[in-house]
Amino acid sequence: MSTRLATGGRLIDRTRSIEFRFNGQRLSGHPGDTLASALLAGDRLLSGRSFKYHRPRGLVASGAEEPNALFGIGEGARFEPNQRATTQELFDGLTAKSQNHWPSLEFDIGAVNTKLSRFFPAGFYYKTFMGPRAFWKHVYEPIIRQSAGLGQPPKEGDADRYEHFYAYTDVLVVGGGIAGLTAAKAAADSGAEVLLVEQTAHWGGRAPVDEDGGEADVAALVDALEAMPNVRMRARTMGAGVYDHGYVLAYERLTDHTDAKEGPRHRLWRIRAGQVITATGAIERPLSFAGNDVPGVMLASAVRDYVVNWAVSPGDRTVVVTNNDDAYRTALALHKAGLSVPMILDARAGGGGALAQAAREAGIRVENGKGIAKVQGGKRVTGVAICAQAGEGAVLETIPCDAVAMSGGWSPVVHLWSHCGGKLTWDEAQAMFRPDPDRAPTGHDGKPFVITAGAASGAMQAQAARADAAVAGAMAAERTGREASRADAAQPASSDEHPIEPVWMMPQGARYDLRSKAFLDYQNDVKVSDVQLAAREGFESVEHAKRYTTLGMATDQGKLSNINGLAVLSQSLSTPIPQVGTTTFRPPYTPISMGAIAGEARGEIFQPLRRTPMHRWHEDHGAHWEPVGHWRRPYCYPQDGESHGDAVGREINQTRARVGLLDASTLGKIVVKGPDAGKFLDMLYTNMMSTLKPGKCRYGLMCSENGFLIDDGVVARWDEDTFLCHTTTGGAERIHAHMEEWLQTEWWDWKVYVANVTEQYAQIAVVGPKAREVIEKLGAEGMDSQTFPFMAWEDRDLAGIRARIYRISFSGELSYEIAVPASQGLALWEALMDAGAEFGITPYGTEALHVMRAEKGFIMIGDETDGTVIPQDLGLNWAISKKKDDYLGKRAQARSHMTDPKRWKLVGLETTDGSVLPDGAYAVGQGVNANGQAITIGRVTSTYHSPTLGRGIAMGLVLNGPDRMGEVIEFGKIGGGRVSAKIVDPVFFDKDGEKQNV
Amino acid sequence: MSDHRTPLGGASRDGRVRVEEMPRRGMITLRGDLSDATFAGTVTALSGTGMPGQRKVELADGGLLAWMSPDELLLVMPPEDVAGALDRIASDLSGQHHLAAEVTDARAVLRLSGEDAAVRETLGKLMPVDFAPGAFGPGDIRRTRLAQVPAAVWCVAPGDFGVICFRSVAEYVYAALTNAAAEGGAVGHY
Amino acid sequence: MLLLECPCCGVTAEETEFHGGGEAHLKRFGPGSADEEFESYLFHRENPRGVHFERWRHVNGCGKWFHAARCTQTLEVFGTYPAQTTRPPEDLLAKIRDKRPGWSWRDFA
């Protein structure tokens, strides 16, 4: 059984006990424990069920690479699935539950899948869920949905807050092991600003466990770094990804280790570094033998970690199996802790070096050239059957044990090096991919910006790793323009370790029944036999084999399985490993929370919400909002019990009969000034603006160079060289940018300045037959049509506020748009509402605006236009100057497709039964196209119920539309059926404009 | 004349740093040839300061003069001075191409004050700018992005920073800043 | 995420302050131009694997447009320069020649 040892445990505080709950049971541990070490100390080895076969699985690792021990941590609004027990620090009151089993962890019905595993080979899904077609909806999809996914999603909104932080540094060091510390010190000694991040809560990495004196070395380095003002150190911060030009994301976990949940939970560091040192260490590889997934089979380094760091023994009798010398350290650590190591199986015929000798001297039986044929046991290891590594798995001997420590060698953590294009090289001697320093990721200046240090470089021995890291630190400092002293990289004394011998399958000639129980990817249940099958079926590219078998596609992203898997593929294809290559390493290194990615962007600051100066008034008066870009505009103001439709109808009727108020502040307002302003606007608008007289307004259309209509609005000439251009609500920033673009990049010698003053002004449209009286009541004089005609503007004082009034109309009514400083917008609005009370004034929203403009046949950008419509399509030829040599879009509008008489043209549409046409409906012609679909001859662009006319009205683009007045055509309805509509003039109401010209 | 309403009604909140809306300030966006002597003379006479260098702000009593782009300045002054300033600009610069637009009410002006490092951290959570004291100090101004909207930030003195944004997003910016300045969010980086 | 230096305000900032604007140094063809000229102006774009000239606007900054010479393969930025020109500065062309011998892009080499 696994248990807590009586002494030791460098990371735990034995003087204190803390309680936590696992699957509802109360358990205890010590401060400094991880959830994994505390569970192991409580003999909770079984940690979950595998994804596909629901096989019992236990802890394999002690760090971020753990594939099995994934739990749901926390409760309610703080619940999060798929958290690794090995990286979850224990705290008082922590709750965890296992996942992917039903009804219980001990007894899981899904485990029947393991008996059927022959029927779940690689590509099972692709091969099985093929047909018949009807099965998809009713059989396959429900089954897949039921069994898909790992863990349960949280059901409540997240209680925590998150944030980003932008940081800048000369040198970023990722990894706080001995190499990272050494590199940071070397870089910082030059005076460079250094930021050092470490994913765990502890500095030093493996050195304190693996090296005599390692702990003291780490403490000395940490002390030295903490004393340096140019060094910043952050534990619990993982370097998640390296991106272009020195951009690095790091993921800081602030409250996951404590029950005090104050402040942000996670902080996403958005770092821009001159140089990045990845001192990310190495990860031990499992060995592929039958039953290598039985709980109790662990990585040798993890076994050592549990014993040394947390004083937990994974078992009483541990068999060590290895192909390298490092695993002997585990045997010696176990022996030192008083635990039994019945046997070390060394797959190498020649065995190990000095460490093997030490093990023998400690009385441990060492067998060279041997391996494990099969692990015995179901939910727990009960023994191992031993065989010759060179054979096919004939059992030589069976050894009872309750744990197995395996080591297939080490793989440098090359993820961060690779994220941004760093290349790898296959190191035959060490049987691993390591970074190729000559092919580093390059930055904005074309120079390398990532350097690896220590084990991440492939320097696996302690002294070599330190020497490598010191050089890396100095090199980083030099590349950021500092002078660094390079300690003589004295060649470390020749190693007394024997070289690794790659073992990709154990035994070498394992039979099918063994290979089909030898797991490569624990989380996705991919076995040696699956990869071999994929190769036989032609999935020869490592990227194809990965997707076909799902090897390395689980939440651990193949940290343990990738190299073993591609080695098996390489053998199956008889292709050398370097030619098979690796799959792509993509960030993040381990999963980061969605909250951290979102940062502050949630709740009221999820996205900017733009408010006009009268926003609060609208809110207080029951506005139903319509989002327009980031603006919120009142759609209508329903009164007690009114439907939205009724409110819109009332607002229109009241405005047409009396007077209405519209908040038009969102319309863009751009000042264009300079001697060349008129010439510039003549290029921007299709019509002539330079001839506009000061004091007057003119409606204009803007097109892109493609000829398509992009915006419209009224231009007012303020004085000889100053114009104010109104844009649509969504167009203010876009059109301002459009103007700047042409001025800066094409006509840079023209004397024109533009300024976007949209938000300087609140703009209020006073609309309706009583509009003039309302304004006059506020003290304005000279409002009569002679003094102040349609399409003019005047300055007046209204209620003591200096206002610029534009007499323009988008409704067909007598209408004034009044611009005042935004700070006085609300005051004017309220004054107008008060003054208008006796005239029956109503505020109206965007829907009433839309309906009234449609009744008048006015187009709306975004309804009648969709980026493919030119003004000529909309019958707006009157607004296109024939006199101008040029304007943006003119040349494009002369292209053959633009002049094609078959282009659909704007018309009005009236249903024959008075109903409202469906929005976007297509008009159906005679016959079918090549695909057997009905021919379409037009489409609806705007459609409303007109309260003014008491019937449905619409506008649409129709083939030869203007030539077909009075003709009835048919439109398709959603869900089938047709509705017929008559083609009419798009101006439905007051064709002669009598109402607006009073 | 009616009361003028600022976008946030003078809101303030104390967290790790104090975030407050400044009283209404008169503002003029001025575009023209910054290297022209007449232009510079007019502007500096109005601001009572020297001409700001690239990405610099000149601080004056009750106002400032900020470099916004190679052909744009921002003049900040008491609101009652704006009309006179616009007249002065129009007459002094009548002979040269320029644009002066009042933007007093187009913007919200906020102040962040408190412990210098805490203010810098608060800004550093929202703006992609190096706020290390050696990289951004008194007299520096930077136009950039504050979370999802454009904004400008300048340093008046250690622990005293100004932020300016468009009026319509004032509530968003205020909420983002007070959220970033909330207790419990110390970074300890500066 | 790219790091670009705005030549107009001197700031070196991350990509989120900028907005890309497509290929640089296009010559506008207006009314009267031949179909081929106009088609080329409107639609034909270089898509090199290597040195490219492109437009950027410092939209969350000084608002100015500028040009960048950038390698689409390595993302190396050779330099940036104000947009008011029809030709990259000579020293920049020389720098690119030095780093990418034999390169060419439209009429530049």
Image: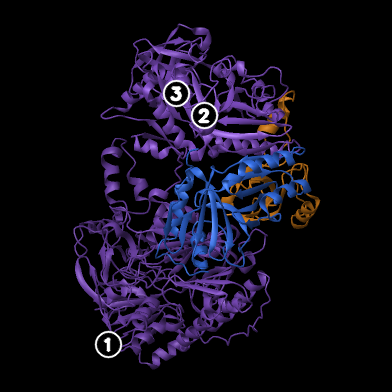
Please rate how many residues cluster around mark 3, counting C-alpha atoms within 10 Å: few if below 14, some from 14 to 19, many from 20: many
The three-letter code of the residue at mark 1 reads Ala
**From where the camera sits, is residue A679 visible?**
yes
Q: Residue at label 2? A: A818
Q: Residue at label 3? A: A774
**Which hue belongs to chain B?**
blue
- Asked if residue C4 lies left or right of residue A617, the reply is right
Q: Which mark is residue A6?
A: 1
- Front residue (pair A867, B152): B152
On the image, the x and y values in percent for residue C88 come to 76, 47
Instruction: State the CA–CA distance, disc 1 to disc 2.
Output: 84 Å
Image point (77%, 53%), residue name: C92
Secondary structure of the residue carrying numbered label 3: helix
Q: Earlier in the sequence, mark 1 or mark 3?
A: 1
Location of the N terminus of chain A by quadrant is bottom left
Please rate how many residues cluster around mark 2, counting C-alpha atoms within 10 Å: few if below 14, some from 14 to 19, many from 20: many
Secondary structure of the residue carrying numbered label 2: strand
Q: Chain of mark 2?
A: A
Same chain for the residues at labels 1 and 3, yes or no? yes
Q: Chain of mark 3?
A: A
Instruction: State the CA–CA distance, disc 1 to disc 3.
Output: 90 Å
Chain whose colour in the figure is purple: A
- For this orientation, the residue located farthest to the top is A966
